[in-house]
Image: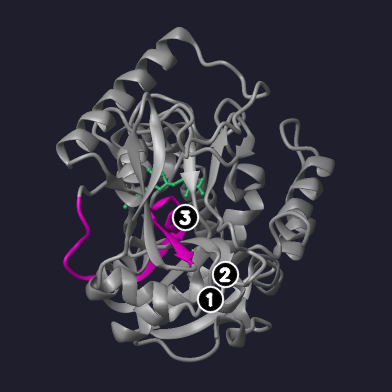
Amino acid sequence: MPTTLHGPDLPEPSEDARRHSDRLSEAIRKEIDSAGGWIGFARFMDLALYAPAQGYYVAGAAKIGAEGDFVTAPEISPLFGATLARQIAEILGRSGGEVLELGAGSGVLATDVLRELRNLDSLPQRYLILDISPQLARRQQLTIEQRLPGLATRIEWPTALPEDFEGVVIANEVLDALPVHLIAWRQDGLFERGVSWENGLVWSERPLPPGALRDAAEATGVEAEYISEISLAAPALVRTLSDVLRKGALLLIDYGFGRREYYHPQRCQGTLMSHYRHRAHDDPFFLPGLQDLTAHVDFTAIAEAGIDAGLKVLGYATQAQFLINSGITQLLEQHPADATLSRFTLTAGVQRLLSPAEMGELFKVIALGRGIDGPLIGFSSGDKSRLL
Ligand SMILES: C[S@@+](CC[C@H](N)C(=O)[O-])C[C@H]1O[C@@H](n2cnc3c(N)ncnc32)[C@H](O)[C@@H]1O
């Protein structure tokens, strides 16, 4: 069933951008044809976001910031990264080692974190950035050269995870960008939602065969009629990271909930969302390659993946709790206002990060660690029971 919700209020792309999207749609159509007429939604999302040279994250669109499709916490306030740096410094003090940032976007978070780590006298020897997008990696290099020329030599862009890592891994809004499977719980059984081609991309469903995806869908306890996402990629990434983490912690920040809230009966249409030019809508087939696709994160699945891989849940908190615990209000008082960032803008930015109506409640922070003991400042008022 095709969706037509994009409506007239979404801005028209340029001719070039439309041609780009048409080329990607054609590549997706060919893949659907060669797969026998159907691909699962996770494969579609993977192609739409990451198809080499064509996907949303790897091709030319601005993506993050005013010119792009969405803003993230580090783009809203430099105090997000500065506050996160305080938690990073505490962990580095116990683990030693380096910082690895996954999916660094525009590079702004790296500059804010490094600047504060320098203030705290906690600079690591190296700050590694691993991003799937070569285009964003170039943008990160430019941002860092312009904003922090003195520290640029400490930053490296490896093309793969190191085999062994000690220190802190951070990832802000990366898990939500990983491809998700879409499941339909129907009166007559479980189905995987996928994509076919009938004069364009259309939804179609197939019975869900036995396997990991079906096991995960059954474990949610959801009852028909219901549509939602299952991410196999996000827990897999946590397992991969935990395989290389010898000592230290993963700090993962994203929007989402524990499993009970995620698969709440009232959330029966799931959390899949499309972002195009700062408008959120629910048609993932609109202009493939020109819009972001995301789903909320099931933090229970993230915690379970970490625990299965031998990590400990060191903390789980809302973004507001985490930032307040880590000292964002003191940082706000100390931060000098200047011509580019007035006191009003600084205060309004922090308000957006903390407000329950904006990012404060919906966004969560989870810390998964190995070989480090004791409470962490960011989680002194967190609530791990919300993971159950
Ligand atoms: C929504 S953006 C968030 C960017 C940035 N962390 C921020 O807060 O502004 C997602 C980022 O994750 C990157 N990414 C997506 N999948 C990835 C993966 N498997 N490994 C590393 N980076 C990935 C994208 O290229 C992009 O930089």
Q: Is the CB of the residue bearing disc 3 within 8 angstroms of ligand 1? A: yes
The answer to whether any part of residue 77 appears in the image is yes
Of 275 and 213, the residue lying toward us:
213
Asked if 173 appears above or below 166 in the picture, the reply is above
Q: Amino acid at mark 3?
A: Asp
Image coordinates of residue 281 in percent, x first then y, are 61, 39
Asked if 323 appears above or below 305 in the picture, the reply is above
Residue that appears at 30% across and 20% down: 23
Q: Which residues are magenta?
A: 160-186
Asked if 68 appears above or below 191 in the picture, the reply is above
Instruction: Give neighbour class at mark 3: few <14, some 14-19, many 20+ (Cα, 10 Å).
Output: many
Image coordinates of residue 32 in percent, x first then y, are 24, 37
Quarter the C terminus occupies: bottom right
Structural distance between the alpha carbons of marks 3 and 2: 13 Å
Instruction: Give neighbour class at mark 2: few <14, some 14-19, many 20+ (Cα, 10 Å).
Output: many
Q: Secondary structure at mark 3?
A: helix
Q: Amino acid at mark 2?
A: Tyr
Return the residue at label 3: 176
Residue 212, quarter of the rendered image: bottom left
Residue that appears at 50% across and 54% down: 295
Residue at the extreme top:
15
Return the residue at label 2: 262
Of 35 and 131, the residue lying toward us:
35
Image coordinates of residue 85 in percent, x first then y, are 54, 62
Q: Is residue 221 left or right of residue 380?
A: left
Return the residue at label 1: 259
Residue that appears at 36% across and 39% down: 49
Does the residue at mark 2 contact the one at mark 1 (Cβ under 8 Å)? yes
